[in-house]
Amino acid sequence: MVADFGLDLRMKVMSNTTVNIVAAFAMSWLSHADTAAIAQGDIQLKSLSVVAIDTVDVPSMRSGKIASLDVREGDIVQAGQVLGKLDDREAMIAVELAKTELAVAQARTMDHSGIDYAEAKLKADRQQSRQQQILRRIAEQQSENETRIQAARKAEAVSKNELERAIQSRNSYSESVSQSEIEGLRLAFEKSRLETKQAEFEQRVAVLQAQAEVEAAKRFDANVEQSQTEIAAAKSGQDIQRLQSLARKQQLELAQTRLDQHHFTAPFAGTIVERHQHSGGWVNAGDPVMKLIRLDRLRVDGYLALDDLSSIQLGDEVELEVQAGTRTIQRVGEVIFVAPTVDPVNQEVRVWIEFDNQDFSARPGMQANVVGTRKASAAKGTP
């Protein structure tokens, strides 16, 4: 019986030890878990309601007749999606015309034939100018060369002297020189005199020719200058063509912008909730066409007592319960705004909490509750 009592005592001790160990482990685990898990009941936010972050009445950018509305209420659209358009036929023609004018301007910009022709002409003019300078120097040297005149004058003097001597000899002694010989000497003298005149004439022509070559050289020099001017003008024209091409490009962009303004475009991804206009109707610039609301990310708007302000900060994660009728939707949001001012009447501060809503189950107008928070440092994993 004593043995049985000892056995029972040992069993109780072991049991209590086991319980203590388990309890200690559980307390340690719970203590660690509390540092990472969302704490319960840290703050009390009042009047929490779900609101849309982005809501917009998509306007018409221009006045005109509505050609089509391509979406209806409830349709989910993407950012940049065309929702409908005005009659844009005239705007489309303007775009095509601007494209054609741009293509013509670009083709002219790429056309270098004017510059190429002017450069080729300049090259030819310079070659002719160099050639003409050579001809001018030749002519000048010829005009300065009096060798033929001098030779002709000497020949004329010799012929004249021979004729005079023959005449004197015949006068002294008639039989010394025959009449025919005298006639031959006279003919030779006349020929020499004519050759002298011809040489003098050719010399004068050579001088005039030299003057003509000088003027021709000046003309070719002027041609070179003209070709250089034509090259400068062609390059200037090319620069003007480039500027015109740029202007045509900007005109195309303007025409495209005007065409785009005939389209009703979604500024962000969301859901169409209302159409204000109908196909075939007329709208003025600025008139709303349809209403678009973003549902994939929503905001909870509420108020926090001033005494609790120190318990929350930007970036804190907040566990929310959104009331969807009889259902409760669990969401985790982030504090993105704490008002810098306090309501002087009730001493409360406005707070915004945003949360993802990819399944669109939460909707603007629903009520929400905060069931726990996690500080920003813990939410970001700061040790």
Image (cartoon, rainbow, N blue to C red):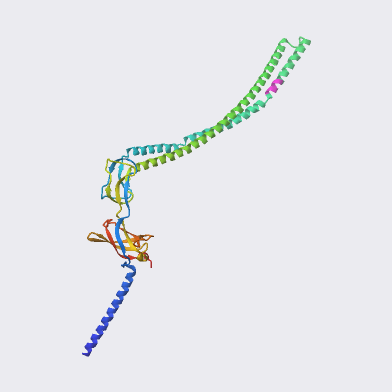
Name which quarter of the figure residue 297 lies in.
bottom left
Residue 265 visible in the displayed image: no
Residue 248 visible to an observer of this rendering: yes
Q: Nearer the viewer, residue 84 or 291?
A: 291
Q: Seen in the image, is 114 located left or right of residue 338?
A: right
Extreme residue in the right direction: 172
Quadrant in which residue 192 is drawn: top right
Task: Give the residue at the far top of this rendering.
Answer: 174
Rendered image quadrant of residue 19: bottom left
Q: Considering the image in quadrants, where does the C terminus appear?
A: bottom left
Q: Is residue 128 above or below residue 350?
A: above
**Depicted 183 relative to depicted 3: above or below:** above
Disc tally is 0
Which secondary structure dominates the residues rendered in magenta? helix
Q: Which residues are magenta?
A: 148-153
Query: Would you say 323 lies left or right of 135 here?
Result: left
The percent coordinates of residue 200 (x first, y second) are 67, 21
In the rendered view, tell whether residue 377 sits above or below residue 92.
below
Name the residue at 72% across, 17% down. 159
Q: Position of residue 132 (x, y in %)?
A: 59, 30
Q: Is residue 27 above or below residue 112?
A: below
Residue reaching furthest bottom? Answer: 2
> Can residue 144 be found in the magenta stretch?
no
Q: Position of residue 325 (x, y in %)?
A: 23, 59
The residue depicted at 64 percent of the width and 28 percent of the height is 140
Q: Position of residue 103 (x, y in %)?
A: 40, 38
Question: Which residue is painted at 33% across and 71% down in the image?
Answer: 32
- In-image side of 304 versus 186 (left or right): left
